[in-house]
Image: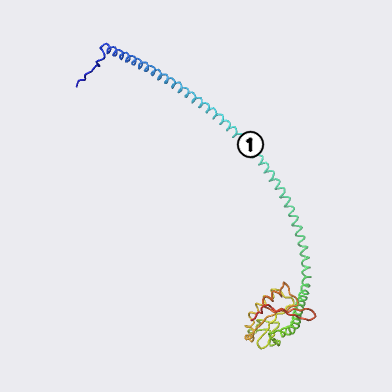
Amino acid sequence: MKTSTILPQELSWTEIKNIVLAVSDQIKETAQLMKENERKLKEDREEAARQAAIRSAEIDRQIKEDREEAARQAAIRSAEIDRQIKEDREEAARQAAIRSAEIDRQIKESRKQAAIRSAEIDRQIKESRKRLLESKRDWDAAMKRMEVTDVLAKQCLNETKYLRNLFQTEWGRLIESLCTPAALKLFSDLDIGISHIYTEGRKAKDNGIDRMEADIILCNGTVAVVGEVKTTCTVKHVDRFLEKMKQFKVVYPEFSGKTVYAAVAAIKYNQSSDTYARNAGLFVIRTTGDGVFSMDQPKKRLTY
């Protein structure tokens, strides 16, 4: 297929020639510019290669200098470390020598002190043996005296126990003998109608063994009063009496059909034991002097 060129009718061949020449000149100028640009690009590449070579050489020089400096510093540090190690070894050896000398001195001093202490111990042992022999002689003599004293002491102790038991027994009987008629009078004035003292036996036995002892027993046909008598009454005495009364009708079966009241009687009450007993439901009998007795009633009477 052929391409035909259509020229504008308004341009002449001279004008077209001039245009072609102008375009040709422009192409030549463009070619020259491209050639100049290629030259400059070549020069820039060569300059860049030269600068790169210079920088590479400078880097190699710096690396070499750094390596040499590092080697020099390492040699200096190694020499310093060797010097410090040598000094430390010399100081350690000097300190070891000082400690060894001190240990030797202490060992000699310890041996000297041990010898002194050993001599002192020997002397003390001799003196102790001497005193022991003297003490043994004194002990033997004292034992002979103590044998005689022991016999006398046992006799005196037995007599003292006998007199103490006799006193306690007789004193207790005296207190009971004073309290019993006074208690009968005090209870006979109340509404429970006590009329006489129970004398058939105040000790209850089981197969011949005493199981319970009542200090005072007052009674009539349907009512009984059991009394505990103490010279000095304490809270512990009250507790023991209350515990003992739990078994009263078991060990005294003859009272199983009666209403049983409980009372405590004492010359002196310690620890507010009188208030404690009254709060527990017991009658409290006390002496006011000259053989006169009084009685405090509980707020609520305890019965068995």
Q: Is residue 99 above or below residue 50?
A: below
Q: Position of residue 105 (x, y in %)?
A: 69, 43
- Say which residue label 1 marks: 91
Q: Quadrant location of the N terminus? A: top left
**Residue at the front extreme, as displayed:** 10
Q: Choose between 87 and 192: the one closer to the eye.
A: 192
Quadrant of the image for the C terminus?
bottom right
Residue at the extreme top of the image, as rendered: 14
Please, what secondary structure does the residue beneath circle 1 have? helix
Rendered image quadrant of residue 82 = top right
Specify the amino acid type for callout 1.
Glu
Residue farthest to the right, as pictured: 290
Q: Nearer the viewer, residue 74 or 89?
A: 74
User: Residue furthest toward the bottom?
Assistant: 221
Q: Position of residue 279 (x, y in %)?
A: 68, 75
For residue 39, above or below residue 125: above
